[in-house]
Image (cartoon, rainbow, N blue to C red):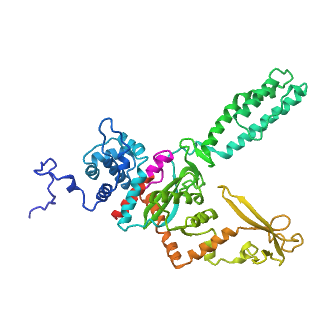
Amino acid sequence: MAKRVPIFKPYFQDQIMAIPPSLDELVSKSHPVRIVNDVINRINIQGLLDAYKIKGSSSYHPQMLLKVLVFGYLSNIYSSRKLEMACRENVNFMWLSGMSFPDHNTINRFRGVRLKQALRSIFEGVVKLLADEGLLSIDDVYVDGTKIEANANKYTFVWKKSIHTNKEKMKKALAEIWDYAQSVAKTEDDLPDPPDLTDINKEKVQATVDKLNAVLADNKDVSKKMRSKLQYVTKNYPTKIEEYEQQEAILGERNSYSKTDTQATFMRMKEDPMLNGQLKPGYNIQLSTSNQYIVNYTIHSNPTDTRTLSLHLDQHKQSYGKHPEAVTADAGYGSEENYDYLEAKDIKGYVKYNMFDKEQKNSNPIKVPFSVDNLYYNKDEDWYICPMGQRMTCLGTFKIKNASGFEQEVKKYQAKNCSNCPLNGACHKCTGNRIIQVNENLNRHKDRAYELLNSEEGIAKRKKRCCDVEPVFGNIKQNHNFRRFMLRGKDLVSIEWGLLAIAQNLRKKAA
């Protein structure tokens, strides 16, 4: 009986082909690289072409470099060195680049310099093309945000609170030395007028140090300890206050920044492997989506979503010539300032306020029986009834500013005889008679939001929001492992996220 042996397919590594296959034959007809190629060929990239100078040697075609970058971000290849390698080794990149082999410096320079002014218009061109195909809507969007870690050292930080504390210490030390100088001065005429240290700056600190040196430097009665303090102040305070002023200029309205990326703010990330709530430098990314396509994106250094909505929607108008007709967002955007903005721009806002979900769950109101919402209000005579049945009279209308500078108008009402009330301590915790404040404008907005959110259309939008915008973030961060920016600075981060947004849209179209 003949011995059976396994059968293998022919393998001739060095065989020469009479008609070698073309790159186009090696690329699958349904491969996403063909979608990238087709879409980039159909959009207007004149703004990118304008970024090149007429003089000088020839350059790689920007359309080819754009295709390589977009397909790289679509394929989870974000490094310029890995993109260079892919153009030499990956059939799909070789077909896309037409057998051009740009090096990593060329790719990085194109991404960081050439795309700076042109990428937004390229992204908008892709969105408009997809909208014309009926894949998304520019008028009806879902908004949400996420935080992405910056390419910055998380241990080289500057905190506004720390600067304020150190400046207070400087003021205290200068005042202490000045008081000592007054005690050792022979006559009151020997000491100039005391400096105003209410708000210190470089000039005030330098002038104060000069005055103290003029008075105490040659005085033999000055103690050794105080002379040492004066030497330290003279040597360090003028340079330190200048450093603090520079840091405050970088901070602006923020509370912190990283020294390696001064535009990155320390934020609390969802990813917390150490489980210690560590803050990390990052950016707040805001997205508008439609059918899981990204319609608009903005980059913010402010960690709070509430203060980003107006800027985000203004960018939408700048991109497409008009605001969206309807916006759906979660309770993180439900502030009076945002409701005023939506009303002023005639945008239908399906935006939750902070207690909306609890109201929907019919939570037991007995848990907070003495809250303002549970008090009886007489609209005609403008007074409330306290839990003991006494009138709470109106003290007047007051204007207050919140942390963002937005001015709110509230009415205050005060109860009577709280000191002898049996509910004192349970009804409220403040000393004296209870005072409540009511924001009528915010209450009006909440009523309108409640009506919209509980309409048939609002219920449908609430159901769709969580499966429209949130999966986009999950896809980018989890499935495509983009959790940290590679570039530094808000402008370059915006370019990087713009490429991700284009890649996400084309990936969705290919699917």
The picture quadrant where one finds residue 153 is top right
Taking 324 as reference, is 236 above or below it?
above
- Which quadrant of the rendered structure holds the C terminus? bottom left
Q: Position of residue 147 (x, y in %)?
A: 53, 55
Left/right of residue 58 with respect to residue 494 in the rendered view: left
Residues drawn in magenta: 481-496
Per the image, is 489 magenta?
yes
Query: Between 355 and 273, which is closer to the camera in this rendering?
Result: 355
For this view, does 244 lie left or right of residue 264?
Answer: right
Residue 228 visible in image: no
Query: Looking at the image, can residue 69 be seen?
Result: yes
How many numbered discs, if any?
Answer: 0
- Who's the residue at 56% across and 43% down the image? 262
Confirm whether the magenta stretch covers residue 321: no
- Residue 36 image point, x, y percent: 32, 56
Which quadrant holds the N terminus?
bottom left
Drawn side of residue 450 relative to residue 50, left or right: right
Picture quadrant where residue 449 is located: bottom right
The residue closer to the viewer here, 139 or 202, is 139
- Give the side of residue 110 with respect to residue 15, left or right: right
Please state the horizontal and vertical placement of residue 389, each as a whole percent of the image.
Answer: 83, 78
Residue under the image location 91 percent in, 26 percent down: 187
Q: Nearer the viewer, residue 458 or 53?
A: 53
Provide residue 113's location: percent of width, then percent of height.
Answer: 41, 43
- Decide: is 149 above or below 174: below
Farthest residue to the left: give it. 1
